């Protein structure tokens, strides 16, 4: 009788071979034992020599790599299973994809922020050059940072201390206090103070600066930035600074009730603008887009000063003069629009990206309607209201800041017509519409709108 081998499966050679192979594959992890059937000869196992010798256990040491490969069918099945698991929206895969998305988002955000800051700096140096005679690396770049807060972000409260610190550094570095570059920076500081409501001593300082500029020679002064990135020239002259000073000092006079002083100042500003327009016309080149744009901005300044003068004469109840000035403002706006349609050679204001022509004619129409209503000419006021609202409610203007103010003004005038006709309910509706239209668009200083509502509510009781 044959002796039973150590392993039951060895009775059949084919089964023994498969099990030996299986044992050898399973024994692949480190620390397990490998079972291998040894024979006395080096020939392949067959039915004749299968029972010669006896099984021998060999210890497999850790990290042993076997030369025996997996079955290709097993490899394909495992690969298919891996791909299917990776493609599924399992919680693990979702967390992995979310982590990768966050890393990429942070990476591109940082890169985009750095690129944006670089281009912003280049834009500031090109567009707002600091005069080359203002020395000091720190002070010059402090002005660029202040300009970014002041103009690009509309944060004069953050720009003001930077401007003041830069001016102090320039003066310590030997800058001439009476130079146009220093006075230009001082004028910018005074404008920021006025926007912040710091009006103590502002009128006296601006009046003194105006007298100094008027006593200066009108020769243009060449100013340019030389900060290794740009060499951009800008012309400064006493007339140009007077042109900028008129806006600030005129508003100070008007707010303080000095209407006559405001009229005199705006008249001086108109004379200066005409001188600047004449200087531009002397060197005007038909093919130069910059000349077209510069001349158009001079026209805008002239139209704006006419509008300011109209406001001042309206405050003095001199309606005939005010009407003439407002009509002139509207005519300037119409000429500008006709010029744009026929000559597309005008650039936007690259400094503020604000088109000062927008709703300037509508603002003049608000005053024309108001003066006619105060004189009792309701029927003549309505056509101005209708014409103005056609401009403020267009698709490209309805969300513009200037147009929102004008639209609220037209609603107020409709309320005044209803109030003067004795229809207080309708007047109250119009006044509330005017208030809400500005309040919901984040306007402040709405005391006049609130006063209109309170007055009509008191009349209804």
Image: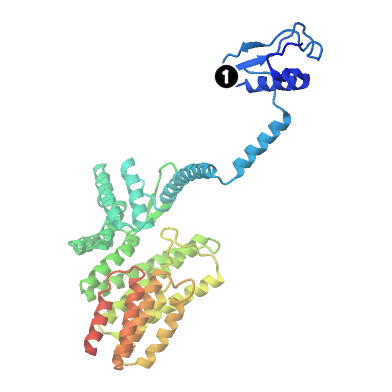
164 or 343, nearer to the observer: 164
- In this figure, which residue is indicated by the disc labeled 1? 30
For disc 1, the neighbor class at 10 Å (few under 14, some 14 to 19, many from 20) is few
Q: If the image is split into quadrants, where does the N terminus sit?
A: top right
Give the percent coordinates (x, y) of residue 342: 56, 72
Image side of residue 154 versus residue 25, left or right: left
Q: Is residue 136 visible?
A: no
280 or 265, nearer to the observer: 265
How is the rendered protein coloured?
rainbow
The quarter of the picture where residue 378 lies is bottom left
Image side of residue 58 versus residue 162, left or right: right
43 or 248, nearer to the observer: 43
The quarter of the picture where residue 35 lies is top right
**Residue at screen point 69% across, 35% down:** 77
**Residue at screen point 64% across, 39% down:** 83
Q: Residue furthest front?
A: 1
Q: Is residue 110 above or below residue 68?
A: below
Give the percent coordinates (x, y) of residue 110: 45, 43
The quarter of the picture where residue 173 lies is top left
Q: If the image is split into quadrants, where does the C terminus sit?
A: bottom left
Q: Is residue 251 visible?
A: yes
**Residue at screen point 82% across, 11% down:** 48
Give the percent coordinates (x, y) of residue 239: 33, 62
Give the percent coordinates (x, y) of residue 272: 34, 67
Q: Is residue 349 above or below residue 341?
A: above
Q: Is residue 264 above or below residue 84?
A: below
Image side of residue 453 versus residue 240, left or right: left
Assign a secondary structure to mark 1. Answer: loop
60 or 121, nearer to the observer: 60
């Amino acid at each position: 009788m044959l002796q039973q081998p150590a392993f039951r499966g060895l009775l059949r050679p084919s089964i023994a071979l498969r099990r030996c192979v299986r044992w050898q594959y399973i024994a692949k992890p480190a620390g397990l034992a490998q079972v291998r059937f040894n024979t006395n000869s080096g020939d392949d196992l067959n039915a004749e020599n299968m029972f010669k010798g006896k099984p021998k256990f060999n210890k497999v040491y850790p990290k042993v790599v076997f030369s025996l490969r997996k079955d290709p069918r097993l490899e394909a099945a495992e690969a298919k299973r891996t791909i299917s698991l990776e493609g599924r929206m399992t919680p693990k895969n979702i967390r992995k994809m979310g982590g990768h998305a966050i890393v990429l988002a942070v990476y591109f955000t940082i890169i985009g922020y750095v690129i944006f800051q670089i281009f912003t700096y280049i834009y500031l140096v090109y567009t707002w050059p600091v005069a080359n005679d203002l020395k000091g690396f720190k002070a010059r770049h402090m002005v660029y940072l202040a300009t970014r807060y002041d103009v690009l972000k509309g944060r004069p409260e953050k720009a003001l201390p930077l401007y003041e610190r830069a001016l102090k550094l320039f003066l310590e570095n030997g800058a001439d206090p009476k130079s146009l570059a220093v006075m230009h920076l001082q004028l910018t500081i005074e404008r920021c103070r006025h926007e912040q409501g710091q009006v103590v001593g502002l009128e006296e300082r601006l009046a003194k600066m105006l007298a100094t500029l008027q006593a200066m020679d009108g020769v243009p002064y060449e100013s340019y930035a030389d900060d290794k990135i740009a060499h951009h020239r800008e012309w400064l002259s006493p007339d140009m600074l007077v042109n900028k000073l008129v806006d600030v000092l005129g508003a100070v006079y008007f707010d303080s009730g000095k209407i006559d002083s405001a009229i005199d100042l705006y008249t001086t500003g108109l004379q200066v603008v005409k001188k600047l327009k004449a200087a531009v016309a002397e060197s005007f080149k038909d093919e130069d887009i910059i000349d077209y744009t510069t001349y158009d901005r001079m026209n805008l300044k002239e139209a704006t000063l006419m509008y300011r003068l109209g406001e001042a004469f309206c405050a003095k109840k001199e309606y005939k003069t005010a009407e003439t000035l407002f009509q002139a403002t509207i005519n300037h706006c119409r000429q500008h629009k006709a010029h744009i349609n026929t000559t597309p050679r005008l650039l936007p204001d690259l400094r503020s990206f604000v088109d000062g022509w927008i709703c300037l004619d509508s603002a003049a129409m608000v005053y024309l309607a108001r003066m006619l209503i105060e004189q009792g000419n309701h029927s003549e006021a309505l056509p101005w209201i209708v014409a103005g609202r056609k401009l403020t409610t267009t698709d490209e203007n309805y969300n513009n800041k200037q147009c929102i103010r004008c639209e609220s003004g037209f609603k107020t005038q409709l309320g005044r017509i209803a109030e003067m006709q004795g229809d207080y309910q309708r007047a109250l509706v119009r006044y509330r519409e005017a208030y809400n239209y500005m309040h919901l668009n984040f306007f402040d200083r709405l005391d006049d709108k609130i006063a209109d509502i309170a007055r009509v509510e008191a009349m209804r009781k």
